[in-house]
Image (cartoon, rainbow, N blue to C red):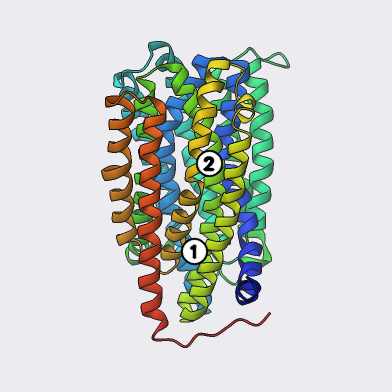
Amino acid sequence: MKALYLKYKPYYRDSLHLAIPVVISQIGHTMVQTADSIIVGHFAGTISLAAVALVNSIFVIAMVIGIGISYGITPLIAQHNGRNEHNECGQLLSNSLLINSITGIILFVLISFGAMQLIGHLDQSAAVVRQARPYLFLMGISLIPLLIFNTFKQFAEGLGFTKQAMMISIWGNVLNICLGIIFVKGMFGISPMGIKGVGYSTLIDRCTMAIVMGIYVFRSKHFRIYLQNFAIRNIDRLRSIKILKIGAPVALQYTFEISAFSGAAVLIGTISPIAQAAHQVAISLASLTYMAASGVSAAAAIKSGNFFGAKRHGELRLSAISNYHIVIVFMSLTAILFTFGNHLLPWIYTSDKHVVLIAAQLLIIAAFFQLFDGTQVVGLGVLRGMGDVNMPTFITFIAYWIIGLPIGYWLGIKSGMGVSGVWYGLVLGLLTASILLFIRFQLISRKHQYKTPVIIAQD
């Protein structure tokens, strides 16, 4: 163990230095939905919490599509920076900002004219649907500033500047929580808005974050050398295609996984609003740990991109494996937390004893899939940094839509196991993705390593 630690020690240090701010920033995305769930669960009731679950199950698909496309710039920035091609970075930012702005508008239109009608035809409770519609509309608008924020965030993180987005995310969540409580409960002369209140607070939060992150990037001295070629005239088809060739498959990867969980939420909604609210509680907690692992994955993508661009493939393997070690340790700790805190954690979200009882059972299942969830998302990040996105996309489709969700439907609905059966199917999907992505990493990284001598970083 000591020899193993000494071998990877410099990579642990570099990875954690980069990953920790990204982890906090990534958790910030999920904390918005988590804060909304907590505020609504305590101040608006179980039906409203079920409405949040329904909206999030649909909205999160649109969100990960947008975020996935915005990730297209990060490995490209990391690779060009690894080759000291600074001028290319500003041109990529110009193209990425246009792509992500258009993506946000398109997704908002799809939510407004598609999802708003769809939720009325999913065999959900009428009371839940009635409260869900205005909340979904406001969340749809918030996608546009969210993706603008993420454009600047991914640009900065691709260059190794991760702390600023972390701080903006932290203060953004503080703003969201404060405004959410004021709007939902009705304080300082404002009439109680119910579930719409958290929609307004989220929209204000994301607009503020986009403005602040943009100001930081354009005014910071750290980025001047990279922004010399940032201009509208540098928007061109070839660079946009290059970004989309990475971003679109990444969006599909996240969509296949998240939509499987969203599909599970819809299936569970046909059981009862209580089961749906319990699913929202458990999935909110599991999403926090997933986004933390996603932060490690993002850092792994950046480091892999740097090493891949510089053709230092031996170091790439060592760095990637160190990120696997980090996520395994972290997710093991969260598994222990879920196991021993399964009856306590749900009370953070709701005081409904029936919801708490079902959510406690689901957290045991969540504890079981923590390692699979963490290792599969790190595998995606490492492969993304190397520019390998098409085969991982196929793997995620097979894992979640051919294996995970169909088995969950059969166990949960057809076999009568209920909400736990649906979750067992999702566990099998995560296990499949984890194994296949690790095999893919081994094959690709070893192929490149044989062409390049291994260089061990000095402590």
Q: Residue at x 38, y 22 (%)?
A: 269
Q: Nearer the viewer, residue 108 or 74?
A: 74
* CB within 8 Å, label 1 to label 2: no
Q: Earlier in the sequence, mark 1 or mark 2?
A: 1
The quarter of the image holding the N terminus is bottom right
- Label 2 is placed on what type of residue? Ala
Task: Kindly indicate the quadrant of the structure image that contains residue 62.
Answer: top left
Residue 441, located in which quarter of the rendered image?
Answer: bottom left
Query: Which of the image's four quarters has the C terminus?
Result: bottom right
Foreground of the two, 18 or 418: 418
Kindly identify the amino acid type of the residue bearing the numbered disc 1: Ala
Return the residue at label 2.
Answer: 367
Q: Where does residue 453 sit, x and y in percent of width and height?
A: 47, 88
What is the C-alpha distance between the residues marked 1 and 2? Answer: 26 Å
Disc nearest the viewer among 1 and 2:
2
Q: Secondary structure at mark 1?
A: helix
**Residue position marked by numbered label 1 in the rendering:** 301
